[in-house]
Amino acid sequence: MPLKILFMGTPKFAVPILKSLSNSSHKILSVYTQPPKKKLRWLKIIESPIHTLSKQLKYTVKCPEDLLNNDEYDYIKKLSPDIVVVVAYGKIIPKKILDISNITFLNIHASLLPKWRGAAPIQRSIMQMDEETGITIMKIIQKLDSGPFMMQKKIKIETNYNYEDLSEKLSYIGAKLIIESLKLIEDKKANFKEQDESKVSYAKKIEKKESEMKWNIPARNLIAKINALSPFPGAWFKHKQNRLKIIKAEESHLTGQEGEVLDNDLTIGCSENSIKILKIQKEGKKSLDTKDFLSGYVIKKGEKIYWNTIIKL
């Protein structure tokens, strides 16, 4: 018998999963997503990717600032879904709602729990140069990403995968895995396993100050950082008061001083080896291949790129 689903999600990562559910036999009762954001620069309101898709699919969309008020509790209780599917929603679900009887809350998490609980599992796995990651389908409890899990799918992190590449791949895996999970629940064959608390690690939210390039670490670590932050928020450095974001780079075996521009192709020295920048973006401009960028912007061989600049948060 098809299940009644309440969906909660916000970013692009959640889009293939909502599409997968919409194409299944299950019934989506309503969708929760974060409120639209005001972009003062363009004087317009930006909806979340899930908000936009939900309107296209003609689902009822709810965008509360939080779920703490009684109105949301009463709405969800009255809706009476069998399953609440949560994918990067970005809001805390209070205990009062989690305790509503006869509702199972499932989270689609982009790591192999208990590794990388928290807000930025994809970025942290790339930064730490993990060889593998995956998707976990878990039951939500009040403690962060700590509930028992019913399914996991492991994948290899390919060399030079950036955040966008890995996020897209994991999203499509999640879209398939949630349908398999719901089938097990529907057939009363779901088996939940407790996480191993001795193997827990946390993927804290990416802070603005982490995005600045610091050349006093090995090139391989900087490449991992660039990939983890590409395309957004992007790893950057300052040159003559211009913030330049590195979209893509590769390790080079050229050596020189930390932060020194080693050639005319924008290769910069690190504590071990160097990085060759392949694609770059000036703040407020579109990204360009380095060759095209250098045809209109001068960074000379022998210049020194400094770091530890003051950042206004």
Image (spheres, rainbow, N blue to C red):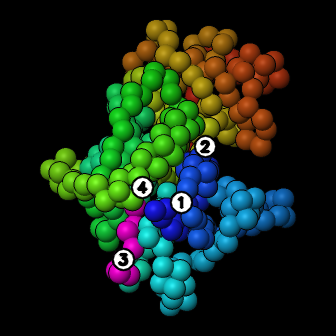
Q: Which residue is mark 1?
A: 26
Residue shown at the point (60%, 77%) measured from the top left = 64
Residue shown at the point (64%, 35%) measured from the top left = 245
Which is in the foreground here, disc 3 or disc 1? 1
Tell me which numbered mark, 3 or 1, is placed earlier along the sequence: 1
Decide if residue 195 is on the left or right side of residue 84: left
Marks 2 and 4 sit apart, C-alpha to C-alpha, by 33 Å
Find numbered disc 2 in the image and state the secondary structure of the residue it sits on.
Answer: loop
Which is in the foreground here, disc 2 or disc 3? 3
Find numbered disc 1 in the image and state the secondary structure of the residue it sits on.
Answer: loop
Q: Which residue is mark 2?
A: 232
Say whether residue 105 is magenta.
Answer: yes
How crowded is the residue under tag 1: few (<14 C-alpha within 10 Å), some, or many (20+)?
some
Tell me which numbered mark, 1 or 2, is placed earlier along the sequence: 1
Relative to the observer, which residue lies in front, 300 or 291?
291
Marks 4 and 1 sit apart, C-alpha to C-alpha, by 9 Å
How crowded is the residue under tag 3: few (<14 C-alpha within 10 Å), some, or many (20+)?
few
Marks 2 and 3 sit apart, C-alpha to C-alpha, by 39 Å
Tell me which numbered mark, 2 or 3, is placed earlier along the sequence: 3
Tell me which numbered mark, 2 or 4, is placed earlier along the sequence: 4
Residue shown at the point (35%, 81%) measured from the top left = 101
Determine which of the numbered discs, if any, sits on residue 102 in the image: 3
Determine which of the numbered discs, if any, sits on residue 182 in the image: 4
Outermost residue to the left: 198
